[in-house]
Image (cartoon, grey):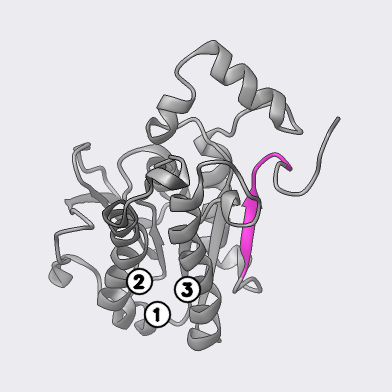
Amino acid sequence: MKNYVIIGGSSGIGKELVEQIETQGENLIATYNTNLIKDRENVKYIKFNALEDTLDLDLFPDKIHGLAYCPGSINLKPFHRFKEEDFIDDFKLQVIGATKVLKQLLGKLKQSEFSSILLFSTIAVQKGFNFHSQVAMSKGAIEGLTRSLAAELSPKIRVNAIAPSITDTNLANRFLNSQSKIDLQEKNNPLKKIGDPKNIAEAAAFLLTQKSSWITGQIIHIDGGYSSINIT
């Protein structure tokens, strides 16, 4: 039985990822901040605030085979309203939070004969959108971190990231809270639909396990083709 850690595993994509790995019969430790979920046979939940807390390493197994960092934010605003503290808050959650967790658990990842790290970006890094400067800046740092760590930690530890387009989660609810907003997002997507968390989690589970043993340093776009093709 392998050991996997999902930071932010109580909602959205993280919750679906926990369920995907759980169905494979593996052992999981998942964190939550506000969305408490009861432990299950192979899943233990730990309260953890990525901005404030330090992980209790005694709660984790000696060997970790896969680690995913899922916390994120979607704060959109015009550039002229951009404040330094806004960017710093996003950067702390999405970049500093990830690096702190990675540094704390790296020793346990190295104890495994193989292991994998998965981070999350956004298609807004590679494709420009109005009002996305704040999220694109911090997620751009995640993409740089992904490639740099993949080089530094190879060949024993693989590092990849997923860059989704808008996905139907609580985080994106304010962009999908009316039929007109849903219709607009579906119209703009080449596959004419909005991403489901399960779509992302299935790929995330693949990247965390040895099924993807020859993939590292990649930013995988899962977005219905939105980042690469135009349908007119």
Earlier-in-chain disc, 1 versus 2: 2
Element under label 3? Answer: helix
**Of residues 225 and 47, which is closer to you in this image?**
225
| Picture residue at 70% right of the left edge, 47% below the top | 227
When the figure is inspected, residue 104 is found, relative to residue 36, above or below; the finding is below
**Of residues 182 and 84, which is closer to you in this image?**
84
When the figure is inspected, residue 113 is found, relative to residue 56, above or below; the finding is below
* Label at residue 145: 3
Left or right: residue 143 compared with residue 33: right
| Mark 2 crowd level (few <14, some 14–19, many ≥20, 10 Å Cα) | many
Left or right: residue 29 compared with residue 221: left
Q: Is residue 84 magenta?
A: no
Element under label 2? Answer: loop
Find the magenta span and give its range.
218-225
From where the camera sits, is residue 53 visible?
yes
Earlier-in-chain disc, 1 versus 3: 1
Q: Which label lies toward us, 2 or 3?
A: 3
Looking at the rendered structure, the kind of residue marked 2 is: Ile
Q: CA distance from mark 2 to mark 3?
A: 20 Å
Left or right: residue 105 compared with residue 161: left
Q: CA distance from mark 1 to mark 3?
A: 21 Å
| Mark 3 crowd level (few <14, some 14–19, many ≥20, 10 Å Cα) | many
Q: Are marks 1 and 2 in contact (CB under 8 Å)?
A: yes
Quadrant of the image containing the N terminus = bottom left
Q: CA distance from mark 1 to mark 2?
A: 6 Å
Q: Are marks 2 and 3 in contact (CB under 8 Å)?
A: no
Q: Is residue 224 magenta?
A: yes
Check the image and name the residue furthest to the right.
232
Check the image and name the residue furthest to the top.
179
Location of residue 64 by image quarter: bottom left
Q: Residue 56: image x %, image y %?
A: 13, 67
* Label at residue 112: 1
